[in-house]
Amino acid sequence: MMVTFEEAGEMLDEIAESLPEEIFNRLNGGIVFLPETKRNPMDPAGQLFILGEYQVNSLGRTIVLFFGSFGAAYGDIGKEQLREKLRDTLHHEFTHHLESLAGERDLEVADARYLHSYFSRMKKQKP
């Protein structure tokens, strides 16, 4: 990638700081930015990367983003393109957080439908 992990972390901090304080309510694990690449374990080809996750466990609620996954999924994108991808992913994970607080799962269901459709297309493309 054309951007270092540290530079991407600074961009993520700026994006997070621009969000309304209220949406951080009960996000006690905060936003974690890891250098790792995370592959979707359901993808046998290993070509589907996880950019971010919303995690709820006994320790609380956390948003995790994976820097390596952005590079693996998007290649050598520039700084502004990465900023846009980070923003989109963070907003997506915050939507999971807010829906979780409200007892809703609409985005989770939409994500599952997308994955089902993706894997169906991949099966059809196999020779």
Image: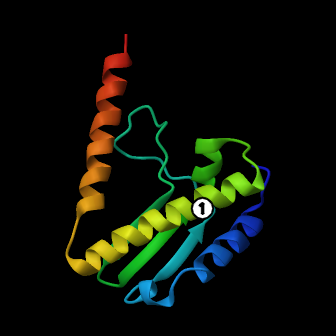
62 or 11: which is nearer to us? 11
Judge left or right: residue 50 versus residue 97. Answer: right
Residue nearest the observer in this picture, 118 or 41: 118
Residue 75 versus residue 83: which sits nearer the camera? 83
Residue at image coords 24%, 54% = 109
In the rendering, at what x and y percent does residue 59 appear? 35, 85
Dot 1 crowding, Cα within 10 Å, few <14, some 14–19, many 20+? many
Q: Residue at x 35, y 68 (%)?
A: 96
* Amino acid type, callout 1: Leu
Estimate the x, y position of residue 81 in percent, counting from the top left: 69, 52
Colouring scheme, one of rainbow, by chain, secondary structure, one colour: rainbow
Q: Quadrant of the C terminus?
A: top left
At x 76%, y 50%, the residue is 78
Quadrant of res 35: bottom right
Is residue 28 at all visible to an observer of this figure? no
Q: Position of residue 24 (x, y in %)?
A: 45, 86
Tell me if residue 119 can be seen: yes
> With respect to residue 33, does 120 lie above or below?
above
Instruction: Return the residue found at the far top.
Output: 127
Total numbered labels: 1
- Residue at 36 percent across and 26 percent down: it is 122
Q: Quadrant of residue 115?
A: top left
Say if 15 sits above or below 28 in the image: above
* 5 lies left or right of 88: right
Instruction: Name the quadrant containing residue 113.
Output: top left
Residue behind mark 1:
86
Residue 8 lies, in percent from the top left, at: 71, 65
The answer to whether residue 92 is above or below residue 21 is above
The one nearer the camera, 87 or 8, is 87
